[in-house]
Image (spheres, rainbow, N blue to C red):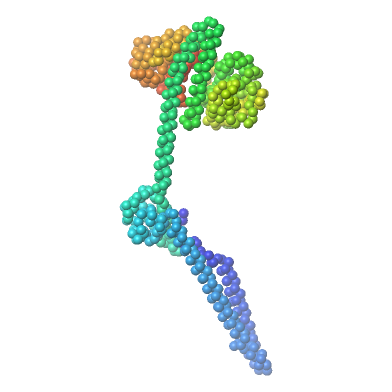
Amino acid sequence: MKPYSHNEHPLPGSGRKKRAGYSVYAFLFVIFFIISLVRAKIVHSSTEADAGTKIPSRILNYGDFSSFHFYLPMLLIIIFIVISFISLKKQLSRKNTALKLSEEKFRLIFEHSPLGIIHFDNDGVITECNTSFEKIVGTPREKFLGTDLKTLPDLRMVQTVRSVLNGNNSYYEDFYNAVTSDRSAPIRAIMAPLTGPDGDIKGGLGIIEDITHLKLNEDTLVQAREAAEKANRAKSIFLANMSHEVRTPLNGILGLLQILERTLTGQKQREYVDMAISSGKRLTRLLSDILDLTKIESEQFSLIKEKVCIRELLDSISSTLSTDCERKNVRLSYNVSESVPEIIHGDELRIRQIIQNLTENSVKFTSEGSITIDAGFIFSGSKDGALVIKVKDTGIGIDSDKLAEIIEPFRQVENTYTRKFQGAGLGLAIVKRLVALMNGAINIESTPERGTEVKCTMKVELCEEIQSDVSEQPLNGEAAIQSLRILLVEDDRINSLMVRRLLEKMTHTVTEAANGIEALLCLDKGDFDLVLMDIQMPEMNGIEAIKEIRKTERFGSKSNICTIALTAFAMAGDREKFLSDGFDEYLPKPVDMEELNSAILRLSPLKNI
């Protein structure tokens, strides 16, 4: 903003067109006047030359310099002077009217502005102010007119005024204490210098606003945000505690059912136990989905980058769901395009969750035919690209007007008491949000009674290095793992019994400890190949114990022992946290026997188990 100058704002009525008009009139008059004078002179000269000739008096009088040729220009001059005077008077009248109108506009703006306005001279003395400024400082103008702003106790205000008098625009925002009253208020002011026609500083103009209401709104917003954050933290703590408390007994139930299943010989009893295990896993999946959805919607969900082999991932998912497909006589297959890199960088757990959720949906709604998973890749540069996953089935299909609904939480095509298909309606909702987190997109095409195709794209990074041992690890490993000496650290008696029986079924030797202190004592006395450790325990928890194991010299080479966190903490971010604390692997409860065996197998090439 430039310093204000009245020369930059000409008054109405003094435009260039009017000035040009007057100039033309004056020019034409001067030309006419010169022509008349010249003509009069010529005629006078001719009269003198012909003085001896007898010329009628009428002609002589006509050519006399004091006759018509002289008085006509004089008359025109007088007429022009009169007309010019009248025109100038009208022009001055218009300018005066415009000036009064401009002054009245300024007065109305000055007096009725909701912002406080002050004028101070080049000594920093207040010479004028409006009513709004009186309200801001809480004092009648008579008390502060004449106040020298440079003598105020507010140093920031003094610096602002001095800067304006030096020709600079200045801004002030602070909690201002009025010197002429006991009123205090947060204000902000914009001040600019006033310059005269010669460019000299003639003072300054200040526009002041009382921002008390803005500060109150800011405080209200801050309090509301803090309250929301507090409520969100309370919700997270509640969900974490509930997740832990539900998963702990669920782990014991499912574990003992798995042990019972391996001891039964009757087909009918095995079917009952299998149905109980299936129901328990369904409850576990629902709990995980609710926690994931809550974390995503509260924006507390983050993705990690790790090496992912899509071919192995699809093989694992296919193996997991093959039993359900065989039971329904549905053919499940997957195809991986040659364009898909062997290894990519992405969040393996979430990519698995997306593909598995889509495939499980297809399994649920397909009673005959086939389900196909296709994986492709679109390169967008030398370092990244998009993973494309298509899951196509020959199931019941979905009406086109229902497609937008099914990707919302807790929404299903069947929403009545006579539902044929069970479920909470969270699978696709979580897929949609996970895909969005990966800067991807989801598209659903479906025809009733013919099937559905879901296509997802996910942004991933290319991996420059390809680990040669990724594809070399066996996928099914009970026979690949030798009998191990395992230290099981678990405070819950039922869970300890269940995990011990599962490990013994795998031919491992198990030593039990009830907390971190007992675990350290066991490590002091004996040799172990692997430690399975709970996190929440009395006296010394799992995190304290693993840090003690990793950092204490007394354990020697045992400080590098393979350790798996076997815990009911299964919120987003828990896995990363426990791995950073020193654990080599993480398994959330309830634990599955095959998952436990796979975790042990994954550690075997790392530390020569």
Out of 386 and 426, give the one closest to the viewer.
426
Residue 75 quadrant = bottom right
Q: In the image, is residue 372 above or below residue 92?
A: above
Residue 569 point in image, percent of width and height: 44, 22
Residue 231 point in image, percent of width and height: 42, 32
Q: In the image, is residue 340 above or below residue 523?
A: below
- Left or right, residue 381 beside residue 484: right
| Residue at horizontal 54 percent and vertical 31 percent from the top | 436
How many marks do you count on the picture? 0
Q: Which residue lies furthest to the front in this view?
A: 417
Q: Report whether residue 310 is seen.
A: no
Out of 81 and 241, give the one closest to the viewer.
241
Residue 387 quadrant = top right
| Residue at horizontal 63 percent and vertical 26 percent from the top | 398
Residue 267 point in image, percent of width and height: 55, 7
Out of 253 and 313, give the one closest to the viewer.
253
- Left or right, residue 569 beside residue 397: left
Q: Report whether residue 126 is seen.
A: yes
Q: In the image, is residue 519 above or below residue 223?
A: above
| Residue at horizontal 48 percent and vertical 32 percent from the top | 299
| Residue at horizontal 54 percent and vertical 66 percent from the top | 13
Residue 541 quadrant = top left
Residue 296 point in image, percent of width and height: 49, 29
Q: Quadrant of the C terminus?
A: top left
